[in-house]
Image (tube, rainbow, N blue to C red):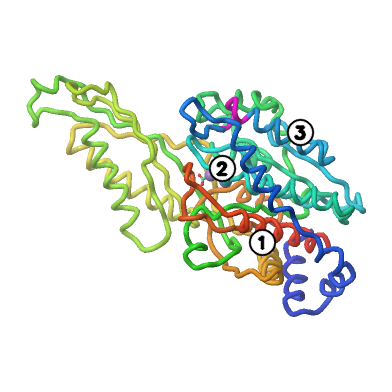
Amino acid sequence: MQRRKFIKQSSLTLAGIGVFGSLLSNNRINEINLSVNGKRIESRIFELAKFGVDEKGRGFRVAYSKGDIEGRAWFMELMKKAGLNPSIDAAGNIIGKRNGKNPSLKPIAFGSHIDMVPDGGNYDGTLGSIAALELIETLNENNFLTEHPLEVIIFGNEEGGTIGSKAMVGDITNDGLNQKSQIGLTMADGIKAIGGNPENIQSCIRKKGDIHAWVELHIEQGGILEKEKIQIGVVEGIVGIVHWEVTVEGFANHAGATQMNMRQDALLAASKFIVAVNEVITSIKGTQVGTVGKIAVQPGAYNVIPGKVQLGLEIRDLNAAKIELLFKEIEKRAAAIAASSKTKISFERQANESKPALTDKGLQQIINSTAKSLGFTTKLMQSGAGHDSQHVADIAPSAMIFIPSVGGISHSPKEFSTATDMANGANVLLQTILKIDKL
Ligand code: GLV
Ligand code: MN
Ligand code: MN
């Protein structure tokens, strides 16, 4: 299926005429009556939250950890019960399949991820995963057979660099596989731990044209929808993300006997660097963001001047060139800080970066009109969070549906979305997939 076709047919739909309008009316009764079970979605969100809780009671379903492995097993059991016959590809992605009436058609795919950041929330990724399963169960319960085969895809290690989706589109490198994951395993060993096969990673690659369309339902993770009292966000684009490991090397020395003008304090230089990052990022107009989100100080004692500091730098924007420009500016500031503090500041760009991506315009229109026809308010918006969808967009028309995040909080145990909003989003997903099925 070509992108063009989605745009053409969906604009006919918006005008209320044409092929798509008449196809919709043929199946009107069945499709319009289909609706997800919101209570089942909510109770499964709570059930999945029980997997990967650490000894302090914090959510730790971090990719490749015991909690991730157990949560995936629970999810696959539900997929089996729903007749999806799940399998794990070489990158550790879980894929479940449901036949359509016409086996020669390419599958429509949807899903998300169930791994989380350390001390994360219970809705990021899990909503789109549980809603995808719910969609299948709704079709099963109503004996509804789509034309296209359907696929539920639960990507492996989204939070640690969208590893599963990168691998699926052929974008993972050896460096990427050798990079350390959040729990300390290399990505390759982590993939093995969840049932994948990194030695044969190429076997999971899907080519352009292999997937008819991909749609991911997700929580917004910001506060725009809630603030503007909008029920459904239609995502236009997803930011690119680049990470650097930054090392500041000074000289560890006695904190009492070393005069202030004799020091090479790595933490003082690192502090100036953190401020400089903020100044560079905010020095130009735009929605770019930059964060120093981790720091480790050596040796780490009251009475020793810090000799070495390791920082994690991240820059995000919808424009890849802007990310590079901002980084060049940060490098210049770092060189000046290093010179004035007699330290050395070096950068190591991390392998698993994400390119910015635009979603498919035709699919945006379908989601928008579908949500409106269900009585929901909508808004076109950007995603400041990264998603597997930005990689799938390389090989298939892709789109995302957002629902409000209460308080705009995410990557936090305080993350929350209401059961009503989750059901609304899942119903938009369901009806969107049924519309795409006719294209
Ligand atoms: C993933 O959630 C990200 O945006 O880092
Ligand atoms: Mn997510
Ligand atoms: Mn996330």
Q: Residue at point 24% right, 31% down? A: 266
- Quadrant for the N terminus in the image: bottom right
> Which quadrant would the C terminus be assigned to in this image?
bottom right
Which residue type carries mark 2?
A: Asn
Tell whether label 2 touches label 3 (CB within 8 Å): no
How many labels were placed on the picture? 3
Q: Amino acid at mark 3?
A: Glu
Cα separation between marks 3 and 1: 33 Å
Q: Residue at x 57, y 30 (%)?
A: 52
Earlier-in-chain disc, 3 versus 2: 3
Bounds of the magenta span? Answer: 62-68
Mark pair 3, 2: CA separation: 19 Å
For the residue with label 3, is its CB less than 8 Å from the closest atom of ligand 2?
Answer: no
Q: Give the percent coordinates (x, y) of residue 187.
A: 58, 28
Work out whether mark 2 precedes mark 1 in sequence or the reverse, and give the earlier one.
Answer: 2
225 horizontally vs 275: left or right: right
- The answer to which of 100 and 43 lies nearer the viewer is 43
Q: Residues within 10 Å of mark 1 (few under 14, many from 20)?
A: many
Determine whether the residue tagged by mark 1 lies in a helix, strand or loop: loop
User: In the depicted view, which residue is nearer to us: 331 or 14?
Assistant: 14
Residue 328 drawn at (x, y percent): 36, 48
Reading the image, the residue beneath label 2 is 122
Secondary structure beneath disc 3? Answer: helix
Instruction: Give me the disc on residue 231.
Output: none
- Residue 273 vs 67, above or below: the answer is below
Residue type beneath disc 1: Asp
Residue of label 1: 360
Q: Which residue is mark 3?
A: 77
- Depth check, front residue: 409 or 341: 409
Answer with mark 3 or mark 1, whichever residue precedes in sequence.
3
Please provide percent x and percent y for residue 91: 67, 33
Element under disc 2: loop
